[in-house]
């Protein structure tokens, strides 16, 4: 088991907080978004908590570490499904059918359990994140918000970079600093994009209420 510096472990909470902030900004997109956010944040928080416990000399709790990708896979699948429902008016049955996303999700989770390895859940997480990022970028582009669309693209690029890094068997301390720095920048892009998109898509009534509150 690696001896983690406390600073490295503490920094791991930063991208979790940024993800939570970004998803909170998008909570109005669909009633399922808050539940999806809770799963994603729980996975990231559990992994960060595990690392901090180890860094402080506490016991190794592998179930905290191991819950990361299953929770991310479920959470981002729900997030992508919610965004797909919100973006289709009227909804397209083929896109919104639960089995389209549920079947590969369950297959990835089952394969991870059988193999006792996280890579199947990791691969499906990347697929779900891709769907979510494309839907968000398209929504931003249609709303005339190129800044948010670009930032959602950068968020997705960060996830693509993180996947291979996280899958490496040898997780040295320098490599983990690179991973966490990349993750922090990616989640910062996501949070800012979500905030910017929310401002762009405010209704006239919401703008009036905001001015009145100010």
Image (cartoon, rainbow, N blue to C red):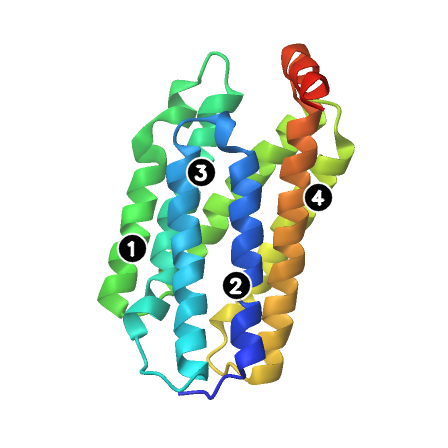
Q: Earlier in the sequence, mark 2 or mark 3?
A: 2
- Contact between marks 1 and 3 (CB within 8 A): the answer is no
Task: Residue at 33% x, 47% y: name it.
Answer: 105
- Contact between marks 2 and 3 (CB within 8 A): the answer is no
Return the x and y of residue 95 as percentages of the image width and height.
Answer: 42, 26
Residue 63 figure quarter: bottom left
State how far apart marks 2 and 4 are (Cα).
21 Å
Give SS at disc 1: helix
**What residue is shown with label 1?**
109
The circle drawn on residue 79 is: 3
Task: Residue at 44% x, 52% y: name it.
Answer: 41
Q: Earlier in the sequence, mark 1 or mark 2?
A: 2
Q: Is residue 97 left or right of residue 195?
A: left
Q: Earlier in the sequence, mark 4 or mark 1?
A: 1
State how far apart marks 1 and 2 are (Cα).
25 Å
Give SS at disc 4: helix
Graded by Cα atoms within 10 Å as few (under 14), some (14 to 19) or many (20 or more), the crowding at tag 3 reads many
Dot in front, 2 or 3: 2
**What residue is shown with label 4?**
151
**Residue 138 or 148: which is nearer the viewer?**
148
Residue 45 figure quarter: bottom left
Dot in front, 1 or 3: 3
Q: Is residue 99 visible?
A: yes
Q: Is residue 37 left or right of residue 139?
A: left
Return the x and y of residue 175 as percentages of the image width and height.
Answer: 60, 79
């Amino acid at each position: 088991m690696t001896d983690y510096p406390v600073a490295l472990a503490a920094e791991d909470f930063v991208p979790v907080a940024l993800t939570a902030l970004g998803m909170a900004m998008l909570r109005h997109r669909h009633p399922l978004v808050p539940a999806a956010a809770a799963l994603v944040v729980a996975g990231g928080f559990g992994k960060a908590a595990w690392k901090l416990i180890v860094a402080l000399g506490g016991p190794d709790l592998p179930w905290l570490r191991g819950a990361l990708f299953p929770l991310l896979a479920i959470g981002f699948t729900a997030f992508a499904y919610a965004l797909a429902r919100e973006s289709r008016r009227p909804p397209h049955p083929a896109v919104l059918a639960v089995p389209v996303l549920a079947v590969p999700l369950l297959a990835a989770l089952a394969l991870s359990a059988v193999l006792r390895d996280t890579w199947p859940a990791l691969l499906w997480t990347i697929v779900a994140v891709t769907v979510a990022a494309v839907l968000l970028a398209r929504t931003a582009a249609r709303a005339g918000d190129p800044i948010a669309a670009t930032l959602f693209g950068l968020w997705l690029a960060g996830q693509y970079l993180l996947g291979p890094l996280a899958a490496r068997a040898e997780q040295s301390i320098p490599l983990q600093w690179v991973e966490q720095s990349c993750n922090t920048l990616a989640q910062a892009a996501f949070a800012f994009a979500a905030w910017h998109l929310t401002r762009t898509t405010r209704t006239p009534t919401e703008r009036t209420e905001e001015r009145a509150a100010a």
